[in-house]
Image (cartoon, rainbow, N blue to C red):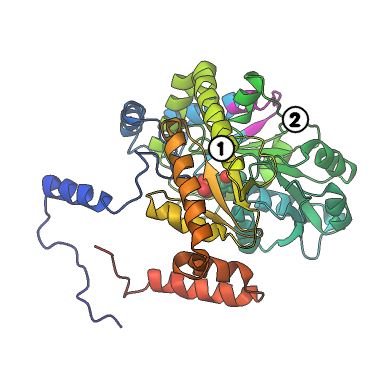
């Protein structure tokens, strides 16, 4: 039990002014995304765009997408977002879909839909439905497997960090309910062999989802700009669904992703209907009940305001920035990129066991950067956004310095968070790691949670 005074609802409300002050104060402890110090989590285009998002969101702040009959404005926006995205991803007139609350919901729903689909084919009723995913698939799919009790079978990656199609083929059995692959993968930014997997899925009459949460609002523009982009969307015949996050490279406000299906024969398996609830007949296409109108409005408004030319402009900046960073990193002795990233997301690692990449990460943190760590293999991660253009030189300079410093002080590998990350990534008993992290989560959500300020 906690011995601290519990926080209680103020007896007398503090009023908006005081509260807004407090909120400003809270921000001080956060990572500094406005100065482009972060390499994940935020896709920030600047204050002007933020104000625009706020205005669009504010106009529909109270509106609820739960009932599209009551708020036809939201249904219209959702429909148009789906159609525009389907167009970008080369879907035909049969493509259907919905606006979800984010990438995770767009990954959870296809697992549910395809499990239901597999079970609806009575003749082929799987005992324990399975899904085949690349080793590099986003963790949201593991969550989906866990929530919906579908067994997740991981296919190994080739040396270029793309999934081994032969291995996927061998994993297919009568329980397989779906295949998933990424365009591109979150850890390494590489596109799996979508065409080959599409053929495989077709041969076995299996649904095939392409997780393009990162690429959906990026690859179409890259292709238009003349970059090499392998076919990854509905042009590949075997692809039955695609997820694309508007709140990532779509630059919308948080809480918006698009989930598309090739046709209603797939999507219908995720729709929930209750005909006998005392609260009334109820129907819902996704996981949420109440759906925030503000997220619909911000997504629609961003797409309409940006248009092809706006996205092309941002994508060009991001790609030039990413290329400069990748070239710079590859030129630092002791570092190498993980594979050949297909877009603006990438991982890099140490080429020598004597240089701890996690210690380099710690040194970068010391210099004010917020950087994510990769494991299996160990590395550092970057997701490039337009404003990173301003800090390319500073980042590379700091990285060069950090590498030098760690080289001169190899014992740093055994200190600070490098020691923890290094240990975590090497513990052979993954169950031990899982339990430790579980305990950390319980503490973080427990009554004794302590705030740093
Ligand atoms: C971000 C991401 C997700 C999950 O999306 P959230 O919006 O964080 O829930 C899923 N897949 C990929 C490839 C992603 O990059």
Q: Residue at label 2? A: 231
- In the image, is residue 200 part of the stretch drawn in magenta? no
In the depicted structure, whether residue 34 falls above or below residue 56: below
Which x, y percent locates residue 11? 11, 63
Whether residue 282 is visible, yes or no, is no
Let me know if residue 93 is in the magenta part.
yes
| In the image, the residue with mark 2 has its CB under 8 Å from the nearest atom of ligand 1 | no
In the rendered image of this protein, does residue 313 appear above or below residue 324? above
Instruction: Pick whichever, 211 or 190, lies toward us.
Output: 190
Mark 2 → mark 1, Cα distance in angstroms: 29 Å
Q: In the rendered structure, which segment of residues is drawn in magenta?
A: 85-96
The quadrant holding residue 424 is: bottom right
Residue visible at 47% across and 52% down in the picture:
402
Outermost residue on the top side: it is: 309
Q: Looking at the picture, how far across and down is residue 416, in whole percent?
A: 44, 67
- Kindly identify the residue that appears in the image at 75 percent across and 56 percent down: 131
Task: Looking at the image, tell me whether mark 2 or mark 1 is earlier in sequence order.
Answer: 2
Name the residue carrying label 1: 328
Local secondary structure at mark 1: helix
Residue closest to the eye, 58 or 375: 375
Q: Nearer the viewer, mark 2 or mark 1?
A: 1
> Is residue 374 at least partly visible in the picture?
yes
Q: Position of residue 159 (x, y in %)?
A: 77, 50
How packed mark 1 is, by other alpha carbons closer than 10 Å (few <14, some 14-19, many 20 or more), is some
Q: Up-down: is 362 above or below 440?
A: above
**Label 2 CA crowd tier, 10 Å (few <14, some 14–19, many 20+):** some
Q: Residue 410, percent across and down?
A: 53, 65
């Amino acid at each position: 039990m906690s011995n601290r005074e519990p926080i209680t609802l103020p007896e007398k409300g503090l009023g908006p002014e005081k509260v807004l002050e407090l909120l400003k104060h809270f921000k001080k402890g956060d990572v500094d995304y406005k100065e482009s110090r972060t390499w994940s989590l935020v896709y920030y285009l600047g204050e002007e765009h933020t104000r625009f998002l706020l205005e669009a969101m504010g106009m529909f702040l109270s509106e609820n997408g739960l009932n599209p009959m009551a708020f036809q404005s939201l249904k219209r926006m959702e429909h148009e977002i789906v159609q525009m995205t389907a167009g970008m991803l080369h879907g035909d007139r049969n493509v259907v879909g919905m606006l979800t609350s984010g990438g995770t919901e767009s990954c959870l729903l296809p697992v549910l839909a395809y499990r239901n689909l597999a079970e609806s084919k009575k003749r082929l009723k799987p005992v324990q439905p399975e899904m085949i995913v690349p080793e590099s698939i986003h963790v949201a799919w593991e969550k989906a497997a866990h929530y919906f009790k579908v067994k997740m079978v991981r296919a190994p990656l080739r040396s270029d960090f793309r999934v081994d199609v032969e291995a996927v083929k061998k994993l297919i059995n009568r329980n397989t309910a779906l295949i998933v692959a990424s365009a591109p993968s979150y850890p390494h930014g590489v596109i799996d062999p979508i065409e080959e997997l599409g053929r495989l899925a077709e041969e076995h009459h299996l649904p095939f989802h392409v997780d393009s949460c990162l690429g959906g609002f990026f690859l179409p523009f890259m292709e238009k700009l003349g970059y090499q982009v392998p076919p990854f969307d509905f042009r590949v015949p075997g692809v039955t669904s695609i997820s694309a996050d508007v709140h990532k490279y779509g630059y919308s406000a948080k809480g918006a992703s698009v989930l598309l299906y090739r046709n209603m024969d797939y999507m219908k398996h995720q729709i929930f209907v209750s005909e006998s609830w005392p609260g009334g007949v109820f129907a819902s296409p996704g996981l949420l009940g109440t759906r925030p109108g503000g997220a619909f409005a911000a997504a629609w408004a961003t797409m309409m305001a940006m248009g092809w030319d706006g996205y092309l402009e941002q994508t060009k900046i991001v790609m030039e920035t990413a290329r400069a960073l990748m070239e710079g990193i590859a030129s630092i002795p002791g570092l190498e990129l993980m594979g050949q990233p297909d877009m603006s997301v990438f991982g890099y690692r140490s080429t020598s066991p004597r240089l701890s990449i996690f210690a380099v990460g710690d040194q970068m943190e010391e210099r004010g950067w917020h950087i994510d760590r990769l494991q299996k293999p160990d590395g550092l991660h970057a997701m490039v956004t337009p404003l990173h253009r301003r800090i390319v030189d500073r980042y590379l300079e700091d990285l060069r310095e950090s590498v030098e410093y760690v080289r001169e002080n190899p014992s740093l590998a055994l200190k600070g968070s490098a020691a923890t990350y290094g240990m975590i990534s090497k513990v052979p008993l993954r169950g031990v790691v899982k339990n430790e992290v579980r305990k950390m989560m319980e503490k973080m959500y427990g009554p004794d949670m302590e705030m740093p300020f």
